Structure formats: C-alpha cells, structure tokens
Image (tube, helix red, strand yellow):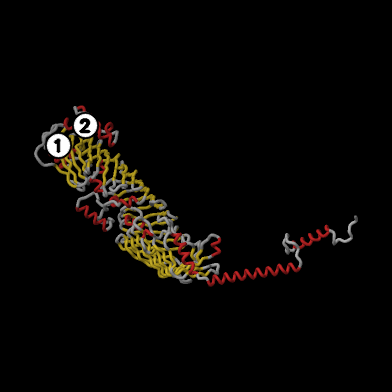
C-alpha cells in the first residue's frame, strides 16, 4: 500500500516531532527529562504549587523565628546543668537566668549564678561561684576546627581551690578522682574580662594557704591587662604572689603573650619575666628566672622537688615548659661561696617527677658541702651561711660535734626520681689537699645510689660509692670508699722552716653500714671496717723515738732541731666497727729504730676517741723511759700526749711481731691485694715469721 499523504497521522513522524520538542526543552533547562510534555495550563498549575509551598515554608520559618525569640531559655538550665554535671563528675548548677543571643555569626550566651561544687572526696564546699558568665564564640573558625572566643566576661567570681595531702585537687575535672596532671589549655580569647574576682587556695600537701584578687579590666587604648595578687602562708612563713600579664584585647595567635611574676616565701624570693608562645596555652611558656634564698631545700613546697640542703643561693636561668616537661637551661649563680652552672630537666609525666641534672663548678668551697648532710658551712669572716645554719654551727662548736643530727625528710626522697652528674674543677679546702670532685648518682623509688664519688688529690684520690636506702621508715646508709695513691706529706702541714715529719705512700679503705634519719644516728649504729696503711715512707727520727720507746732521746732530738729521717717499713691502723664503736688491737708502726703497736677505741656516737701506742726497741738503749703515746678526746679536736706513770713491762720484739704478723697477712688484701707482696708491710710479715711468729 502506498504511504498516506498526511504526516499528522504518521507514527514515525509524530515520534520525531516529540523528540525534537523535548530536546529543545532540555537545552533550555525548562523540563524534567522524565516528565511528560506540559502545555500552558500545566505550567501555570506548577507555578501556582511552587508559590504555595514557598509560602508554607516562609510561614514555618517565621513561626520558628518567633519561637526562638519568644522561647524561655531558662527551660534549658536544667538540661545544661545535668549535662555539665555528667561530663565533670560533680554537681554544676545555673541558679539565675540563661540569656541567649543566637542570631549572629558570633552567637553569645550569658549564664547568671553559676555554681560548681567540690568533688565528693573534698566535702560540701564550692569550687567556684560566678555571679555572671558571658561567652561569645565565632562560628566560622569553628567550622575549620579553631575555637575562638570573641568575648569571655566573668563577673565577681569566687574560686576556692583545694589540694589534699594525697595530691588530689579540686580543679581537676576528671571523673575518676585521679589528678590528670595535664596543663590547662584555653581557646583563644579576643576579649577577656574578670571583674572583682576572689581566689583562695589551700594546699595541704605543701602547707600553703593563699588568698588574693584576680582581675582583667581592659578597654581599647588603655588596657590594664591581667593581674593576680595575694598573700598567705607557706610552711608557717609569710607568702606573697604577684602575677601580671599584657593586654588581652585582640590578641594575635601568632604573637607571644608576655607576663611577669614575683613570689616571696619567707626569705625566698623568685622573680620571672616571660611569655606564652601561644596565648592561653598554659602548657607552654618560657621565662627568665631569678631565685634568691637561704636554702634550696626550702623550694620543695613551691616546686615539689626534693632539692638538697645548701648554703644561701642566688641563681639565674631560663625556664621552659613543654607540656609536662620543664627545662632550666643556662643555669648559673652561687651556692654559698661556690659557683654553680649547668642544666636541669624535670619530667612530670610519670607518677613521680624525674629530675635530670648536669652541674659543674669552677671552684667549690669544701665547707659548703656540709649543708648537704644537715650540717653548716664555715661561719667565719667572709663565709656565707644563713641565720639557721649559723645557729647550727654554733651548737656543733659548743658540743664539739662533727656529725650533724638534722633528720632526713624521707617522704621527700620517695616523692621523686633523679639522675645527677656533678663536677668541680677545683676545691678550696684549707686543711685538706683536695683538687677536684666528680659525682654521679641516681634516685629511684627512694633508693639513692651514688655509684661514682671521687675526690681527687694532688696524687691519688679518695673514691668509691655510697648508697642511701630510704624505702623503709629508718633509712640504711652503706659506704665503701678507698684512699689510693695518696702521699703523707699532702695531709700533714709543715711549719715554716721545718722539715716534713712524715713522708710516704698512704692508702686506706672505709666500709661502713648504719641506720638512722641523720648522719649522727647513722654513724652511731655503724658496722664495718676502717683501715689506713702506710706501706713505706720516712719519719723524722725524733718522732720515731717518741713512740713510747725512748722519750728522753726523742725529746732531745726535737729540742736540738734534728731533722734526720728514718724509714717507715710499714704502718697500719685497723678498726672494726660495731654499733657505732670502732675498736682496734691492730695498730702497727714499724720504723728502723722501733716497732710500735697499740690499740684504740673510737666512739662515733659520742664522737670521742682513745688510742694508745706502745713500742719495742730494735737495739739496746742506755737510757730508756717506757711511756706509751696516747691520742684521746673529742674527734673534732683530739689531744696528743704521753701516758704518765711508772715503768711498764716490755713484751719483747719477737712477741710484738708475732702479735701483728698473722692479722696483717689477712688485712692488707682488704685494702689492696698487692700490698702484702709488693710493699714493705710484706717484709714485716716475713720477718715476724722468721722469728717464729704463728702464721695463722
């Protein structure tokens, strides 16, 4: 059949016409590709529907706006309080009106009558009460993760902070009642105002009470800045705190925020000037610090660090805080009459603070060390000592005491860990030939180990280790020190124009263990051994003759000024300690003319000594006065004398040698394994055995 002459009824042509029309509509953005074609009436109905929907939405928006404008925000006080209480683990309430202004890119809210209770363990007190707290925040930076407060105003805050003896504190809002120790980091605040604030602080762990005012009243062009000022008591002494900061208006997050502080606690004064690298991040700051006071140990209640007792000090340094790590760099100044420098670092991230210190002195005044053990430095003209230390020195002088009885603060030793290195390039000690010092110690859970203690001499050194175990109620102190390579002439002064009375090598060992809270108590209970050996040397003949052998000749040589020397073959003093009393029956002084032997007793508790030396001549004497030499009296100032009385029986040289040979053979290796073979003491033992002395 031939095709129809009319295109209007041709299905193919109709389909093509519909497709072309739809394509034109799509290109013009006027139609849904899946919607059927609409005519003019359909389009009018669509537009009418859109107008109705827009009207409904506008009405709903208007209703919502009216709802927000007319809404009583006080209805949210309860939910907000309950939410805050649940998050902090303590009761928080809003007792006044809640005012909200949400219609801004910087919405604001004001809370009237904010009350924060103490945690349950602290009782029924209030941590904070605020008359009015206003907060305004920027929304756009918040979308990028930056918290910026346009305004924070606190009117009449009354803040009362408490730290319990166990370390818990009320300003920690962790719900497990365990102090987090994390530093406070606030968001950036463009305008910060504190009006007539009150701050009270009761620190029962450090015996500190404080009451002060806090304010930040600022106006553009005449900003006053942040101020905290108050007074109190620290360990019974007056305490004063002053802190000032720069203006808090329009702070730039990239600019450090400057502040300064002054602390006075009794005779201690600390001043600081520094900055927060990022404003309101209290976990990071740096400051230049100056500290002046009578004793570094007094800083314990301010810092929580168990610092040693020292003479009066004046120190400077740069303190930097990074989170829970504090560094004191470029430390310099004086402790008593000694200079001190170095670096310190305190890490508080663990349960106990850890102190790492590397210190040094160009010149150490030796008497300044006495304060480390509870004693006092020298108090003569030109010496530096606090009033309390001067009183201690006078008391020890009156009682002729050497060992101080100031008790050790055991709880402080247990409260921190430490590692310390110290080196003194030179030592000033008028009565001791000390050249330098080198010390390394560690403190771990109350166990203090000074594993390297070295005092260098012009020749040789006095070195060893000391341990203090403060993990129990009564500390135990153990020391093992050796004197090696020393010379007698370094220890015995020579009068002008005179000859050296003694020359020769000197070695020794001190091994003691005692219990007590003070040095005096420890020495009073000490057990152990003390040995001093002169393996070889020379002695002025006059003194050798005075060893109870020939007093007449000895005095004659002294009076005539005779300077001749005789060899020292061996000299040994051996004491065994039991309950603080050193006893010896092994005192030997063997010279060419005489052999001296004796016994002695040194009471470390009473600090008194009694030593007696008898002697036997090695050749016949025409004139002989047998009178033993004695050393007796207080340890601080003993007296040398000759025992008065009639003639005494003479034991004979063989008997005297027999009495000392066997003990010496066992004793010398305790000091130095090579002494018995290489030194003249070995010859003394051999001679005694040749004369029939027992070998055991």
Q: Can the viewer see residue 224 in this picture? A: no
Judged from the image, the secondary structure of the residue bearing numbered disc 1 is loop
Residue 265 screen position, x and y as percent: 33, 61
- Quadrant containing the C terminus in the rendered view: top left
Residue 672 found in image quarter: top left
- The answer to whether residue 166 is above or below residue 442 is below
Taking depth in this image into account, of 326 and 280 the one nearest to the observer is 280
Say which residue label 2 marks.
661
In this rendered view, identify the residue nearer to me: 204 or 610: 204
Q: Indicate the position of residue 562 as horizontal and vertical percent values.
A: 18, 40
Label 2: which secondary element: helix
Instruction: Report x, y in % for residue 183.
Output: 43, 57
- Nearer the observer, 346 or 454: 346
User: Looking at the image, which residue is at 89% across and 57% down?
Assistant: 3
The label nearer to you, 2 versus 1, is: 2
Q: Residue furthest right?
A: 2
Specify few, some or many for label 2: CA neighbours under 10 Å numbering under 14, 14-19, or 20 or more: many
Q: In the figure, is residue 340 to the left or right of 666? A: right
Q: Is residue 355 left or right of residue 542?
A: right
Given residues 646 and 411, the one toward you in this image is: 411
* Quarter placement of the N terminus: bottom right
Which residue is disc 1 drawn over? 549
Q: Earlier in the sequence, mark 2 or mark 1?
A: 1
């Amino acid at each position: 059949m031939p095709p129809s002459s009319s295109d209007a009824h041709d299905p193919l042509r109709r389909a093509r016409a519909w497709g072309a029309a739809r394509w034109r509509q799509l290109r013009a953005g006027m139609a849904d590709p899946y919607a059927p074609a609409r005519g003019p009436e359909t389009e009018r109905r669509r537009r009418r529907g859109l107008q109705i929907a827009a009207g409904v939405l506008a009405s709903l928006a208007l209703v919502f706006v009216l709802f927000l404008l007319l809404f009583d925000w006080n209805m949210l006080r309860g939910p907000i309080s309950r939410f805050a209480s649940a998050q902090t683990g303590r009761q928080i309430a809003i007792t006044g009106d809640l005012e909200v202004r949400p219609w801004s890119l910087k919405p604001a809210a004001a809370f009237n009558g904010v009350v924060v209770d103490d945690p349950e363990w602290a009782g029924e007190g209030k941590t904070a009460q605020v008359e009015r707290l206003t907060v305004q925040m920027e929304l756009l930076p918040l979308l990028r993760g930056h918290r910026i407060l346009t305004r924070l105003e606190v009117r009449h805050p009354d803040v009362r902070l408490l730290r319990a003896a166990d370390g818990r504190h009320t300003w920690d809002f962790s719900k497990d009642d365990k102090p987090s120790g994390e530093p406070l980091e606030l968001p950036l605040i463009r305008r910060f105002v504190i009006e007539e604030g009150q701050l009270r602080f009761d620190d029962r762990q450090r015996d500190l009470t404080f009451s002060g005012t806090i304010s930040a009243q600022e106006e553009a062009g005449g900003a006053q800045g942040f101020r905290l000022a108050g007074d109190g008591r620290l360990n019974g002494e007056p305490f004063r705190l002053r802190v000032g900061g720069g203006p808090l208006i329009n702070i730039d997050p990239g600019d450090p925020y400057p502040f300064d502080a002054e602390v006075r606690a009794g005779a201690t004064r600390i001043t600081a000037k520094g900055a927060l690298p990022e404003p309101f991040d209290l976990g990071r700051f740096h400051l230049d610090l100056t500290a002046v006071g009578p004793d570094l140990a007094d800083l314990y209640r301010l810092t929580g660090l168990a610092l040693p007792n020292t003479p009066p000090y004046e120190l400077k340094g740069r303190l930097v805080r990074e989170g829970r790590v504090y560094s004191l760099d470029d430390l310099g100044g004086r402790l008593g009459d000694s200079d001190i420098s170095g670096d310190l670092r305190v890490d508080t991230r663990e349960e106990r603070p850890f102190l790492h210190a590397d210190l040094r002195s160009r010149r150490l005044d030796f008497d300044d060390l006495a304060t480390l053990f509870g004693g006092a430095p020298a108090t003569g003209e030109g010496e530096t000592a606090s009033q309390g230390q001067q009183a201690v020195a006078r008391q020890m002088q009156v009682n002729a005491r050497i060992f101080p009885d100031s008790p050790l603060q055991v709880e402080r030793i247990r409260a921190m860990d430490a590692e310390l290195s110290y080196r003194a390039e030179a030592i000033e000690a008028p009565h001791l030939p000390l050249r330098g010092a080198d010390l390394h110690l560690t403190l771990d859970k109350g166990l203090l180990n000074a594993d390297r203690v070295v005092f260098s001499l012009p020749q040789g050194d006095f070195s060893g280790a000391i341990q203090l175990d403060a993990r129990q109620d009564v500390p135990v102190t153990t020391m093992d020190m050796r004197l090696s390579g020393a010379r007698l002439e370094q220890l015995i002064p020579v009068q002008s124009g005179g000859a050296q009375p003694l020359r020769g090598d000197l070695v020794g060992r001190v091994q003691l263990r005692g219990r007590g809270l003070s040095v005096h108590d420890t020495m009073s209970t000490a057990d152990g051994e003390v040995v001093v050996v002169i393996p070889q040397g020379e002695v002025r003949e006059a003194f050798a003759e005075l060893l109870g052998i020939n007093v007449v000749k000895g005095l004659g040589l002294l009076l005539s000024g005779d300077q001749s020397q005789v060899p020292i073959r061996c000299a040994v003093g051996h004491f065994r300690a039991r309950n603080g009393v050193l006893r010896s029956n092994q005192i030997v002084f063997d010279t060419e003319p005489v052999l001296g032997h004796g016994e002695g007793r040194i009471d470390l508790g009473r600090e008194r000594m009694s030593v007696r030396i008898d002697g036997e001549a090695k050749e016949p004497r025409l004139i002989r006065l047998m009178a033993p030499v004695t050393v007796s009296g207080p340890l601080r100032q003993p007296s040398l004398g000759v025992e008065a009385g009639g003639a005494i029986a003479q034991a004979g040289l063989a008997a005297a040698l027999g009495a000392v040979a066997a003990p010496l053979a066992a004793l010398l290796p305790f000091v130095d394994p090579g002494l018995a073979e290489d030194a003249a003491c070995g010859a003394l033992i051999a001679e005694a055995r040749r004369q029939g002395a027992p070998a055991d």
